[in-house]
Amino acid sequence: MRDINAKIKTLRMATARATLRVRPETLAAIRERRVPKGDPLEISKAAAIMAAKNTSQILPYCHPVLVEHVDVQYELGADRIDVEVSVKVIHKTGVEMEALTAAAAAALNLYDMLKMLDDEMEIVGVRLVSKKGGKTDFRNVYARALRAGVLVMSDTVAAGKKEDKSGRLIAERLGELGLEVARYEIVPDDAETIVARLLAWSDEEQLDLVLTTGGTGLSPRDVTPEAMGRVIGREAPGIAEAARAFGQERTPYALLSRGRAGLRGGTLIVNLPGSSGGVRESLDALFPYLLHAFKIMRGGGHETK
């Protein structure tokens, strides 16, 4: 199985369709309730639901998911039965296979219940109709037009006593997302220096996004949140809360982070922890979803659901 630990939970939906070709007389028997084994549509609906809930027990690479909703719809044509199954869940992985397995199971159960009436039946297709909710749905078209800065706050790194890993990790991830890393700098844990850099990058350079790393804890030299209070005009608390919540599921020490996030003019500034592990988890929690902020900031509005 693939490691999905780095993913966040989102609403996932998938719809699949299976088609069973039958004789017109078979369809007439269904409509007139003359099938000896009972109502094949209702029983096949139950089969689809059971299959959706148990897909991981059939397909070895599927992760177990707590299926929250399964909808089964039928369309009876002149010589075919179309089964459409929709599956919904809030999870880290999609439910395409659950929908496909459910649609296939419904078609197979129809076949089983109708085979005594029709020896020419054929399952002619099982296909995915749609899926929604994965990370690709949240990729932002503005990413390649965004200029970013990475500010590393650390006395030891600034003094050359320690290698910077966290800042490089941030720059690499931003590059993968299509952002231009226009500024990268290492400064000591000094509030005046931090404020000066953030003001310059926001007011003078007008960067779109600034990610900082370090200085968010409880040690006497951790002054990043205080510096942020002197810079940002509009706080965005949900960003830091999301990063902490994601980290808390992996280490109990995440609750000690005091990182903040907010806007100064058109620049979004986000504090990340100083450790490379904390940075990696925060990036997993926030991207690419955070990039939607720039669509909103530029008057793009929200999608209606």
Image (cartoon, helix red, strand yellow):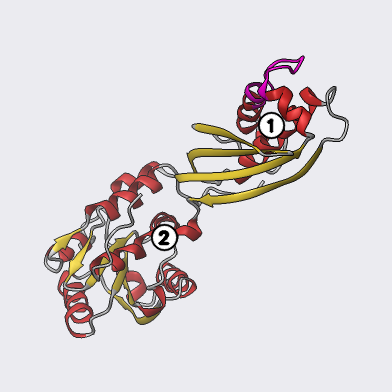
Give the left or right position of residue 123, taking residue 138 as reference.
right
Q: Range of the magenta residues? A: 31-44
| Residue sitting at x 35%, y 45% | 245
Percent of width and height locating residue 219: 25, 55
- In the rendered view, would you say 119 is above or below 223? above
Count the numbered circles shown: 2
Mark nearer the N terminus (2 vs 1): 1
**Position of residue 36 measured from the top left corner of the image (x, y, whole percent):** 77, 14
Query: Which residue is rendered at x = 19% and y = 66% of the image?
Result: 263
- Label of residue 10 in the image: none
Residue 39: within the magenta? Answer: yes
Between residue 145 and residue 152, name the one nearer to us.
Answer: 145
Q: Please, what secondary structure does the residue beneath circle 2 have?
A: helix
Query: Residue 116 appears at what percent x and percent y?
Result: 85, 22
Q: Which mark is residue 283?
A: 2
Q: Which of the 4 quarters of the picture holds residue 201?
A: bottom left
The residue depicted at 28 percent of the width and 75 percent of the height is: 208
Label for residue 106?
1
